[in-house]
Amino acid sequence: MSLLDVIAVIISLTAIFSYVNHHTLRLPNTIGVMLIALMMSVILLLVGLVYEPITTHALTLLNSIDFNRTLMDGMLSFLLFAGALHVNLDDLSKQKGVIAVLATVGVVASTFIVGGFSWMLFGLLGIQISLGYCLLFGALISPTDPIAVLGILKKAGVPKSLETKITGESLFNDGVGVVVFLALFGIVTVNQEADTWQIAWLFITEVIGGGLMGLILGGIAYAMLRRVDNYQVEVLITLALVMGGYALAGSLHLSGPIVMVVGGLLIGNHGRRLAMSEKTREHLDTFWELVDEILNAVLFVLIGLEVLVLSSDMSSWIAALIMIPLVLSARLICVAVPVSLMKLKRSFSPNAIRIMTWGGLRGGISVALALSLPLGAERDTLLIATYAVVIFSIVVQGLTIHKLVKH
């Protein structure tokens, strides 16, 4: 199939699933379309037992889509910028200490907690996976996903201060998580030595360098926006910031996600207040909200369809189900410890630890990183575990977070 054919099929499925969800399930659109895609995948697998060609055609379509590149090198830049565009910088600044700790120390600690416990779990179940690959699983599953978090928190009624903490953490910790994953990936799969200074330098260049580039590119875009009063041109400038900035960050080996978050925060706050007319603000918001909604829906349809490529090994699925409470426990530890310490000097909303733990959703970024692992039995098992955690996170946690908030 040509690229245009693949895009046409995915957009058409997304539109149909969104229509069905709107008229029947009436769930949040991202969760609804993913559940429908999941049901369709299961139906295709069952029909494939009787008529194999239908499953073969579906797999051909999915195999023609590189999920990792589609998300990490394409959709992610738009989704992160659109998400950051509507985050209040003043609110974020008030919670910067909590966000910084959770997005850095929390991610690293979770990586080793999940990695260590998953290694023991796989060993008990007789599944041969090295400690290095278990740490890679810890790195890819630890960051909370901003794409999943942002859409669901808006409708959950979470207290503003808590929403800012969870949102801010999710916007920044995926960039940190990707850096940790890349460092471990080099050690595990390329047999690089675990050079502490090299890892530290990677973190500095990717994360801090990405933040500086986001400020520079966002500043240039802001200066251009101040000198023009034409919403078509101004929307085009933000589009260039996203596409050009992400491509430039990749070529310079800087964190593209961090560049997008910083650039989006700058344009969404200073740019919105000081460089745009009311008409431009309306058109800019409408454009990026539409981009955000469409790409979110497409992404969650793809997540739902990816079940077709998973292995049917029963022991891997048993391990995956046990991995759900394990990952949640690691999340609880990495939230409870720092928050409990910070409570000695600052106040938190009631049930903050419980809500932040349950509201830390995993999503497409984890699936994309799992799919980037080298082909083999270890990848198949870790992909199933990742998929189980992501589906539980989005469906169960996503649909119940508002009930947790009310109690």
Image: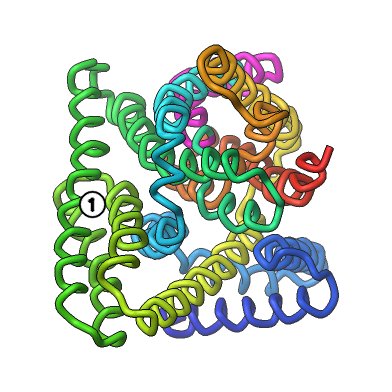
Give the quadrant of residue 241.
Answer: bottom left
Residue visible at 62% across and 14% down? 120
Magenta highlight: main SS: helix
Residue 92: give x, y in percent of width and height: 43, 43
Residue 303: give x, y in percent of width and height: 60, 58
Residue visible at 47% across and 28% down? 98
80 vs 277, left or right, is right
Is residue 16 placed above or below 144 in the rendered structure? Answer: below
* Residue type at the position of mark 1: Gly
Work out which quarter of the rendered image holds the C terminus and state it: top right
Magenta span contains residue 125: yes
Residue 397: give x, y in percent of width and height: 73, 44
Camera-side residue: 147 or 141?
147
Camera-side residue: 140 or 143?
143
Q: Which stretch appears magenta?
A: 119-141
Residue visible at 45% across and 54% down? 87
Magenta span contains residue 193: no
Camera-side residue: 374 or 404?
404
Give the quadrant of residue 336.
Answer: top right
Q: Can residue 38 be seen in this view?
A: yes
Q: Mark 1 points at which residue?
A: 214
204 vs 22, left or right, is left
